[in-house]
Amino acid sequence: MIWAFESPEVHRFEHLSYPLRFRLDLTGWRISRADWQGLSLDARQALTRAARDADDPSFVSCLRGLVATAQPCPPVDAARYDDPRPVADLLQTVDVTLTPEVWQKLPSCGRFALTRLSASPDNLGRILLALSQDW
């Protein structure tokens, strides 16, 4: 899965999508950008598809089968991305209010993506686009 608000590099499979990054975090795996770019396009597309379903147990086996250099790391708790404040604070700079209802309707992977995007004010347009999409 690749969302419309993701960078052009993600759409060209040069960088990892947010759903894929989220799945890697949750399952405790890391792939370097160089290793990602060293995979065939088919392998990158397969991993991106496998990351789509958070409950799919085949993700880790797909990852291990395609990326011999994937490194285990401590898994991240999805609750880490439940705090809307980083996103809400950035949105307030353009007089947009992020309501708790809107935040809670987002899938955990969406909250992950928006939290990561909110680290840079340059991503404000992408956050606004993300909030306008049908989750």
Image (tube, grey):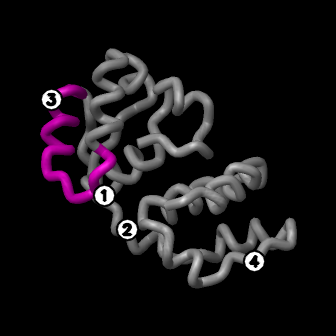
Disc 4 or 2, which lies upstream in sequence? Answer: 2
Is there a contact, CB below 8 Å, between mark 4 and mark 3? no
Question: How far is disc 4 from disc 1 in space, using C-alphas?
Answer: 29 Å
Disc 3 or 1, which lies upstream in sequence? Answer: 1
Q: Amino acid at mark 1?
A: Leu
Q: Quadrant of residue 127?
A: bottom right
Question: How far is disc 1 from disc 2 in space, using C-alphas?
Answer: 7 Å
Disc 4 or 3, which lies upstream in sequence? Answer: 3
Q: Which residue is mark 1?
A: 26
Q: Position of residue 36 (x, y in %)?
A: 38, 26
View extreme (bottom): residue? 100
Q: Position of residue 32 (x, y in %)?
A: 40, 32
Question: How far is disc 4 from disc 3 in space, using C-alphas?
Answer: 44 Å
State the SS at label 1: helix
Disc 1 or 2, which lies upstream in sequence? Answer: 1
State the SS at label 3: helix
Q: Residue 78 got which mark?
A: 2
Is residue 3 left or right of 97 when viewed as pictured? left
Question: How many residues crowd mark 2 within 10 Å: few (<14), some (14–19), many (20+)?
Answer: some
**Magenta span:** 51-68
Residue drawn at 70 percent across, 73 percent down:
88
